Amino acid sequence: MRFVDEFRDADKAHALAAKIAALCEPGRQYKLMEVCGGHTHTIYKHGLEDYLPESITLVHGPGCPVCVIPMGRVDDAIHLASRPDVIMTSFGDMMRVPGSNGSFFDAKANGTDIRMVYSPLDSLKIARQNPDRQVVFMAIGFETTAPSTAVTMLRAATEGLRNFSVFCNHVTIIPAIKAILDSPDLRLDGFIGPGHVSTVIGCRPYEFIARDYGKPVVVAGFEPLDILQSIYMLMLQLSQGRSQVENQYSRVVPWDGNTVALKAIGETMELRPYFEWRGLGFISHSALKVRSAYESMDAELLFSVPGVRVADPKACQCGEVLKGVLKPWECKVFGTACTPETPIGTCMVSPEGACAAYYNYGRMHRTRVAEAARLGAS
Amino acid sequence: MSVDQGGRRELPVLDREQQVLDRIDRARRRTPRVREERITMSHGSGGKATQTLVEAIFLDSFRNDLLEPLEDSASLLLDGTRVAFTTDSYVVSPLFFPGGDIGDLAVNGTVNDLSVSGATPLYLSAGFILEEGFPVADLTRVVSSMRDAAARAGVSVVTGDTKVVQRGKADGCYINTAGVGLLSRSVSLGVAFARPGDAIIVSGPIGDHGVTIMLARGELDIEADVSSDTAALNGLVGSLLDEVPDVRAMRDATRGGVATILNEIARAAGVGVLVSEDDIPVREEVRGACELLGIDPMYVACEGRLVAVVPAGSADRAVATLRAHPLGAQAAVIGHVTDQQPGIVQLKTAFGGTRIVDLLVGDPLPRIC
């Protein structure tokens, strides 16, 4: 398949693996964080770690949109959805995320009208078809999905649609990265920057990471060769003692981002003073809410939601996993009490979550491509 | 530290990680229990949730030696004659889709469940649950395609039942078919018979039916030239068993796709399974649609494809025999049974890495970004 197979070429991967291995200083351990859940998914789906020398560890970061939704927000959404006048619409991978009293799937089985959509624009369609019901879109995701929510709101406003609103849970990536960098129990050597988020925000917002924290950042695409090349670029920076922001995904990511998308977000949404992230706690200025000019589309204002904060289950160590302090299998409940069938923490829900990715794809005796390992050892 | 034939070497797995993996393995072998208070859509997906429901509720109550193997059909001894018996219900939406409709699906599915058990399908029953208001013209269309499918497969529908429910209590038309077939061959088939070294074969490109249905629902605004692979496999199975009588097992890859069958093999036989992504036939259109939706074709349903386990020495003959039949033209060996990591299916990715292919919990859900 064109534009896909070129980025999955095993011969090129072998060549890159050898170059990466050659850059490893003997005796030094490298920890690189891929911030984005899409990268985590690619890494596991293609078995990319097999190409890396033993001295390089990939740490799976907080960029999985459903993984960072706190239980209280899921409860609020289900409370909203259970009103008879409401149709709740949601992306597919939100459906299994557990609240304190079950997931959207469970609520749906109890008769709540929750419908899966592929785009927020589908929610508009449902709103037009059901003029006597309020259609609420469960908006989740980083700057990647926020523009599509924004565009949908703008369109609803243009059409004068009165029965569409948004339960806004959009979060922003930079404060989360900063929280991780400031976390005392962490040692990272560099970041594989989130490609899709960067198509919107560009590369400039990462400059503080290189400048203030001295860590290299390479914004990466989502095919396995993209990630391998980004690891090579990070290793090259580390071997040369540089810390800069580089763009591996230049075929998609403009350095200054997408100003039209940013404008749409800015017009319809504004920063919240603080927002709770699952496992990471409250992070200031880290999420978006509906701007007051669009308050008629703000489900939080239209309906009363309990807004009760629900503490993460005690046994759950999602926070440590999200920060990369623990590997998924090091969590106390991993794989026994917490599995993809019965997730306790959200890292186990989405295929992008570090725990689900490890459980579904990585739970095996590991082998590595011999060439990379041999070169790494020499 | 050992180097295997693939030029890879096994790393010493950290003791602690291995302990965790062992603990998980034990947890997975525990008797399944349904934790949900109500049935959710996941229970019908063919994945782990379905398996748990079947084992914890149905098998637990009905337990007997004939049911216990949980094969596609039960093999019974009736007055000295070996007979295969099976049943399946069809609730597909939409009822009509490119390449078929609920009618031929209902005949072919049951014919295939009998065929892959090594039986010659003979007689079917047909039960209809119809919703008030369902157009008679549609019913006629469904029933005539059942008639044609039965004629093609050489079976007769010999008994049936009709129920009508109030509008809104069903989605147009549901069909249940049961079937009996004669186990006249002296073969003994079962996924539990898979042995290390055996080859694993699929009879053609995977995922056509599932992708066709997803696109036919019209929710995705994607157009692709795909049609369902629904077909009766008794002819194909017949020629395979004639030429390769030492086939160990066959399954038709329906709900849950090829990945689910591979897991059933690994689990029932207590073996490992290693398949190679490069060798699995997938049509470009199907791959493209799956790529866009972020789902894996390995989990997408087929309705006219079988997975066969054959001894290594018979693999070439089996593939040649399948390819000689129009329904098996793109048959291929996709991997083999190993003695490594019993119960686990591993995939050698086209990229050159390795990963697990586990059972899904429920339906594959599209990823958001």
Image (spheres, rainbow, N blue to C red):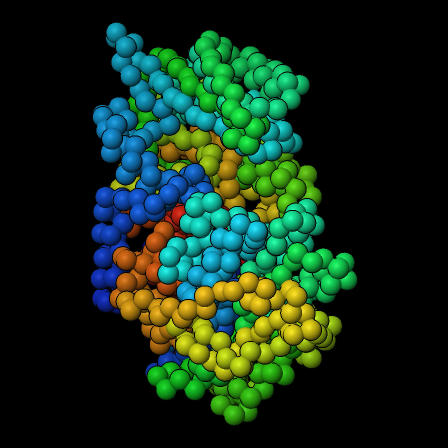
Q: Is residue B213 visible?
A: yes
Q: Is residue B225 shown above or below A29?
A: above
Tally the numbered discs. Answer: 0
Residue drawn at x 37%, y 57% is: A101
Which quadrant: the C terminus of chain B? bottom right
Q: Is residue B106 left or right of residue B193?
A: right
Q: Is residue B271 visible?
A: no
Left/right placement of residue B88 relative to residue A3 reads left
Q: Which residue ends up furthest to the top in the rendered image?
A: B79
Q: Nearer the viewer, residue A25 or B157?
A: B157
Q: Position of residue A341 (x, y in %)?
A: 36, 51
**A151 in relation to B41, above or below:** below
Q: Nearer the viewer, residue A133 or A149?
A: A133
Please indicate whether residue B197 sits to the left or right of residue A115 in the image.
left
Quadrant in the picture for residue A371: bottom left
Image quadrant of residue B355? bottom left
B321 on left or right of A199: left
Spot occupied by residue B28 in the image (x, y as percentages of width and height): 27, 49
Farthest bottom residue in view: A212
Q: Residue at x 50, y 82 (%)?
A: A284
Residue drawn at (22%, 52%), measured in percent from left and top?
A: B26
Which residue is most to the right? A158
In front: A320, or B318?
A320
- Vertical placement of B263 versus B129: above or below? below
On-image quarter of the N terminus of chain B: bottom left
The residue positioned 61% from the left and 24% from the top of the image is B134
* Towards the viewer: B83 or A179: A179
* Residue A368 on image: x %, y %: 38, 63
